[in-house]
Image (cartoon, rainbow, N blue to C red):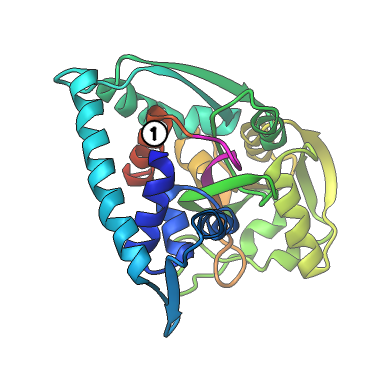
């Protein structure tokens, strides 16, 4: 009931279903269906569209006026029942690919646990984003931090973006082909030069592997795959010892401690970006702990 009221209030305040859905962490089609079903159930029209903005009808104004009073009373009741500190508790199951567990999750978890020590956080690691997505879809996870692949039954909330880089062994001829280019942090290399060059590939279920194949297809190139490995860190270390090139996120390059790191190059114009998002299953009723986690992650500075 309270959630239904908050949905209508959000649409009224935003004047737009898409923006309201984003603020509520639900999909736009789900919110549109809800408003339509509610209007049919009540037998009144709550919104009318004027100049591409949703405006409350007279019935809508009465609904929102009362809805705000009810939600305020309910919030006050929750605060009184939960104690003076209003501390969050309960279970929160979070999944993360192993790469992200190592590089992104420690700072996130430290901040969240310090703020909400009574929340029982259960972490699940997997080598691939697909493994985490499967756990989300089966209901075994509440949230996940993964690279979005836009699966239809998952909601993605992007919160971090970094550059994908080409790691090239210093001994490889390709390493001398980089050029300084305005607007690029690293020397720039034409990715087409990777054609027929030694390359360290990732397991096919890795999201970066799919992205790499997309890049190769767009540029009509076929690198010479020397090895297939499970982790980005392993690919980076193979590039370090000179076995071949590897495509890696900048986070790995910045935080991996290797004695003789490979040379790093930007590629693509504009640079090739790699997105990170919080994901959950469409239709999931998110707990307060999950909502607070999402809010924290979206506002926590990420390494960049």
Whether the magenta-drawn stretch holds residue 278 is answered as yes
* Rendering coords of residue 161 (x, y %): 48, 53
Q: Is residue 230 left or right of residue 14?
A: right
Quarter holding the N terminus? top left
Observer able to see residue 241: no
Q: In which quarter of the image is residue 57?
A: bottom left
Residue nearer the viewer, 92 or 265: 92
Q: In this view, does 233 lie above or below 117?
A: below
Residue nearer the viewer, 52 or 290: 52
Q: In which quarter of the image is residue 220?
A: bottom right
What residue lies at 73% left-to-right and 61% top-to-bottom?
215
What residue lies at 81% left-to-right and 63% top-to-bottom?
217
Residue nearer the viewer, 116 or 243: 116
Residue nearer the viewer, 45 or 293: 45
Extreme residue in the front direction:
43
What residue lies at 50% left-to-right and 33% top-to-bottom?
256
* Rendering coords of residue 62 (x, y %): 30, 60
What residue lies at 18% left-to-right and 23% top-to-bottom?
80
- Helix, strand or loop at label 1? It is helix
Part of the protein shown in magenta: 276-285
Overall secondary structure of the magenta stretch? strand
Residue receiving disc 1: 293
For disc 1, the neighbor class at 10 Å (few under 14, some 14 to 19, many from 20) is many
Observer able to see residue 116: yes
Q: Is residue 91 above or below residue 1?
A: above
Extreme residue in the left direction:
84
* Rendering coords of residue 16 (x, y %): 43, 68
């Amino acid at each position: 009931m309270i959630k239904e009221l908050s949905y209508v209030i959000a649409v009224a305040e935003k004047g737009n279903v898409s923006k309201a859905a984003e603020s509520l962490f639900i999909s736009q089609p789900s919110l549109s269906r809800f408003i339509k079903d509610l209007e049919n159930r009540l037998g009144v029209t709550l919104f009318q569209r004027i100049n591409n903005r949703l405006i409350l009808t007279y019935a809508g104004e009465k609904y929102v006026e009362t809805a705000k009073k009810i939600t305020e009373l309910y919030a006050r009741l929750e605060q009184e029942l939960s104690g003076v500190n209003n501390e969050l508790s309960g279970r929160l199951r979070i999944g993360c690919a192993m790469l992200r567990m190592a590089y992104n999750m420690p700072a996130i978890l430290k901040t969240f646990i310090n703020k909400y020590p009574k929340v029982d956080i259960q972490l699940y690691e997997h080598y691939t984003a697909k493994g985490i997505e499967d756990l989300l879809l089966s209901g075994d996870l509440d949230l996940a931090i993964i690279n979005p692949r836009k699966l239809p039954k998952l909601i993605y909330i992007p919160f971090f973006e970094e550059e994908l880089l080409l790691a090239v062994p210093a001994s490889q001829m390709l390493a001398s082909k980089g050029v300084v280019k305005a607007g690029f942090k690293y020397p720039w290399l034409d990715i087409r030069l990777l054609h027929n060059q030694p390359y360290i590939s990732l397991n096919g279920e890795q999201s970066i592997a799919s992205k790499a194949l997309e890049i190769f297809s767009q540029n009509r190139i076929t690198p010479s795959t020397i090895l297939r490995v499970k982790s980005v860190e392993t690919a980076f270390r193979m590039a370090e010892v000179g076995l071949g090139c590897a495509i890696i996120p900048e986070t790995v390059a910045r935080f991996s401690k290797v004695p003789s790191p490979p040379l790093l190059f930007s590629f693509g114009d504009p640079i090739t970006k790699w997105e990170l998002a919080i994901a959950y299953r469409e239709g999931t009723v998110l707990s307060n702990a999950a909502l607070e986690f999402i809010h924290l992650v979206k506002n926590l500075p990420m390494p960049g």
